[in-house]
Image (cartoon, grey):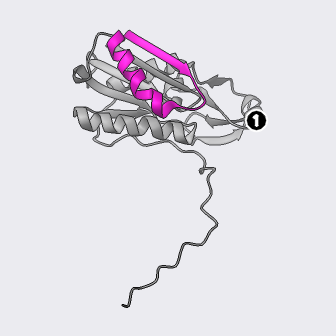
Amino acid sequence: MASDGLILGFDTSAAHCAAALLSGDRVLACRTEDMGRGQAERLMPLLQEVLSEGGATWAELMRIGVGIGPGNFTGIRISVSAARGLALALDIPAIGISTFDVIDRLNGPDCVAVVPAPRDQAYIRVPGGTPELTPLAEAEASGFAPAFAPSPDILAQNIARLAATAPTNGQAPAPLYIRPADAAPARDLPPVILADDA
């Protein structure tokens, strides 16, 4: 397991674009930007800025850690796609890290991990349980002390820390979706394709 090389961790699972470059446990550079949209255009320049600030190049990276959610569907796909492409181009492992894993790292595995969701809801995971979407008020009134997702800079740093010691099983990172997408299939019937008998 690699733990002393350069690790780049990043996340766009919520209304932010966050990245951190670590060498071992030392943070060389970290940047976050609040943004409701535009992560697809901003992510790669932000990653380059973090590398430059840390005095590193893409070729020096040993691993990539990427936030896989839960959170915004489009945001998660942006980060995961970028991580998979970078891993392929750089021939290094990309490791998906959930926000729940970061919460556990910061608060211990016996916490009730809570990630805010739209419409006064939250993604929660009780110890040993399956993640679910529930009203935020229910999560707060569950009798357990909820442990919430950290700020984006702490999230990116801990994604990198967890990726540094995670086993590489060869599987590409994949989004962690807890609920189905809000998008619905098109209601229009598909066009009829006529055979060309001429």
Q: Quadrant of residue 22?
A: top left
Residue at the bottom extreme of this rendering: 197
Residue at 53% x, 33% y is 13
- The answer to whether residue 127 is above or below residue 177 is above
- The answer to whether residue 64 is above or below residue 25 is below
Of the pair 160 and 192, the residue shown nearer to us? 192
Residue 18 in sight from this viewpoint? yes
Q: Residues within 10 Å of mark 1 (few under 14, many from 20)?
A: few
x and y percent of residue 159 in the render? 43, 24
Q: Is residue 31 magenta?
A: yes
Q: Which residue is mark 1?
A: 138
Q: Amino acid at mark 1?
A: Glu
Residue at 33% x, 33% y is 94
Range of the magenta residues? 25-53
Circle 1 — which element?
A: helix
> Is residue 21 found left or right of 109 in the rendered image?
left
x and y percent of residue 2 in the render? 26, 23
